[in-house]
Each structure stands twice: as C-alpha cells, then as structure tokens.
Amino acid sequence: MSASNLLRNVKPVNLREARGQLSKLIRSKELSVFLSKGKPVSFLVPYEDMLDLVETLDQLQDKKLLQEITRARKEYAQGKAVSAERLLTIP
C-alpha cells in the first residue's frame, strides 16, 4: 500500500473516544490517527501494513536499488523501455 493511499484511508479518532474503543479499533484492522484537541498525535497501523512499511524502509537503505530506480525513472521519462533481463537482475 502506498503512503498516499495509506493516509487517504486513515480514520480520525479523538483520544477520548479511542480509550473506550481501543479493542474495536484494533480488530477493525483500519489505519487510525488519534487526535488530541483536533491535532494528530499518534497512529494505529494494522500489522500487515506495518510490515509493508518496514520492508519499504529497508529497501530505501539499499543504495544500489535506489540508483537503479533513479536510472529507470530517467529512462522512462525519455520513453525508453527496460528489458526483462534487467528487471530480473535487480536485487
């Protein structure tokens, strides 16, 4: 799930309401943002979504992969295609 989709689907919950609904919020497996005085203070992120986020963060630490992404974006902007062989060799 992309970050923009994740944030678009967030359910705002007032902290006072959250106290009484925590079990329900956890079981719903929806992303929730807790608000205090109308301002965001914390997120409740479903487990699978959190695993995806952690995996993405790990990938962002791979300099070789980031260089390949940058190269591919430039080539795409120029209308070039990427060969299947090259895609299969990306770490």
Image (tube, rainbow, N blue to C red):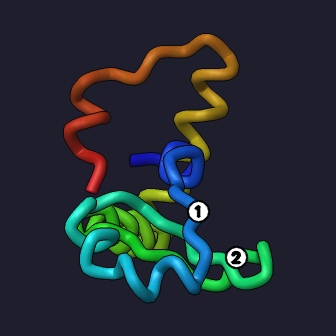
User: Which residue is found at the position 57% from the left and 85% from the top?
Assistant: 16
Please give the residue where the numbered disc 1 appears in the rendered image.
12
Label 2 SS: strand
User: What kind of residue is marked 1?
Assistant: Pro
Give above or below for 19 relative to 43.
Answer: below
- Compare residues 34 and 87 and report the one nearer the observer: 34
Please give the residue where the numbered disc 2 appears in the rendered image.
40
- Compare residues 5 and 67 and report the one nearer the observer: 5
Decide if residue 68 is on the left or right side of residue 36: left
Decide if residue 39 is on the left or right side of residue 12: right
Label 1 SS: strand
**Percent position (x, y) of residue 57?**
44, 72
**Percent position (x, y) of residue 62?**
43, 70
User: What kind of residue is marked 2?
Assistant: Pro
Question: Is the Cβ of the residue at disc 2 closer than 8 Å to that at disc 1?
Answer: yes
Question: For residue 44, which quarter of the picture?
Answer: bottom left
